[in-house]
Image (tube, rainbow, N blue to C red):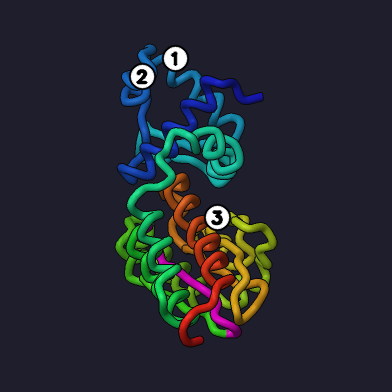
């Protein structure tokens, strides 16, 4: 059973790793929690035994596992949501673009383009039977995909985005598929965060992002969720074009 302090340490490891893209060590965490490095190492060893983090051979620090990210998304992100200003600039930009007086297709594309820019991920959106993709280069600017094998794995995943989306069959308003949870591309170290919304094209349209498992889930979940909500809201009122 994970303790409150272990949860807090796991949260910090995930958030710091998202920022620095390097394994997180006990010295950094000891300063943050105002305890000894030995105490942090003991708690990290327990988190590793439970499968929430792992210890790369080339570093003394720890990296989150898919299980760790899943715990974070399910539990910690929800608890910490009130610590973040929801109406930030990114959310306002998404809402403004989604509600602009433009055609349905251009509204979806513009919202997806904004998600790619704001999250630094690849963004995708369904428009009828068509899948729109933006920001592919964002993926290959991330250090996880510098390695040739990882590049090939993520490239194969991109080639199969449409069948991947169909197999994933997201059913909730906001869905998160982390690493090995993905139906296609299990070894690509990628996460799909996607929102469902109703559009003039379908009662099950999607908008979201594909990125590394190492990312700012609080920020991305908020932006993708608002993108879906904003598009569905604006499609309920009369618009120009189609």
Left or right position of 105 against 197:
left
Instruction: Say few, some or many: other residues with alpha carbon within 10 Å of mark 2 (under 14 / 14 to 19 / 20 or more).
Output: some
Which element carries disc 3, helix, strand or loop? helix
Image location (x, y in percent) of residue 216: 41, 47
The answer to the question of whether label 1 and label 2 lie on touching residues, with beta carbons closer than 8 A, is: yes
Which element carries disc 1, helix, strand or loop? helix
Residue 70 is drawn in which quadrant?
A: top right
Q: Which residues are magenta?
A: 119-129
At horizontal 39% and vertical 18% (from top left) the residue drawn is: 33
At horizontal 41% and vertical 67% (from top left) the residue drawn is: 122
Residue 160 visible from this viewpoint:
no
Which residue position is annotated with label 1? 39
Left or right position of 96 against 235:
left
| Earlier residue among tags 1 and 2 | 2
Which residue sits furthest front? 238
The answer to the question of whether label 3 and label 2 lie on touching residues, with beta carbons closer than 8 A, is: no
At horizontal 49% and vertical 56% (from top left) the residue drawn is: 226
Image location (x, y in percent) of residue 7: 54, 27
For this rendering, which residue is in front, 61 or 16? 16
Instruction: Say few, some or many: other residues with alpha carbon within 10 Å of mark 1 (under 14 / 14 to 19 / 20 or more).
Output: few
| Earlier residue among tags 3 and 1 | 1
For this rendering, which residue is in front, 34 or 77? 77
| Earlier residue among tags 3 and 2 | 2
Q: Which mark is residue 179?
A: 3
Looking at the rendered structure, the number of numbered marks drawn on it comes to 3
Q: Is residue 149 above or below residue 43?
A: below
Which residue position is annotated with label 2? 30
């Amino acid at each position: 059973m994970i303790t409150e302090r272990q949860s807090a340490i796991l949260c910090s490891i995930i958030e710091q790793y998202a920022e620095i893209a390097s394994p997180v060590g006990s010295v950094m965490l000891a300063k943050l929690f105002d305890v000894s490095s030995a105490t942090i190492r003991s708690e990290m060893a327990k988190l590793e035994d439970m499968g929430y983090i792992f210890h790369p051979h080339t570093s003394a620090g720890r990296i989150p596992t898919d299980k760790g990210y899943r715990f974070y998304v399910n539990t910690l992100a929800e608890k910490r949501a009130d610590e973040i200003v929801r109406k930030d600039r990114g959310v306002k930009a998404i809402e403004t673009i989604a509600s602009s007086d433009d055609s349905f297709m251009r509204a979806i594309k513009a919202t997806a383009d904004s998600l790619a820019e704001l999250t630094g991920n690849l963004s995708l959106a369904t428009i009828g039977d068509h899948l729109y993709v933006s920001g592919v280069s964002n993926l290959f600017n991330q250090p996880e995909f510098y390695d040739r094998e990882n590049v090939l794995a993520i490239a194969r995943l991109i080639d199969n985005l449409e069948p991947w989306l169909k197999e994933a069959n997201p059913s909730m308003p906001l869905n998160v598929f982390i690493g090995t949870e993905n139906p296609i591309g299990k070894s690509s170290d990628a996460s799909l965060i996607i929102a469902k919304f109703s559009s003039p094209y379908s009662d099950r349209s999607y908008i979201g992002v594909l990125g590394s498992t190492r990312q700012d889930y609080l920020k991305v979940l908020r932006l993708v969720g608002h993108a879906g909500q904003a598009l569905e809201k604006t499609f309920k009122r009369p618009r120009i074009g189609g």
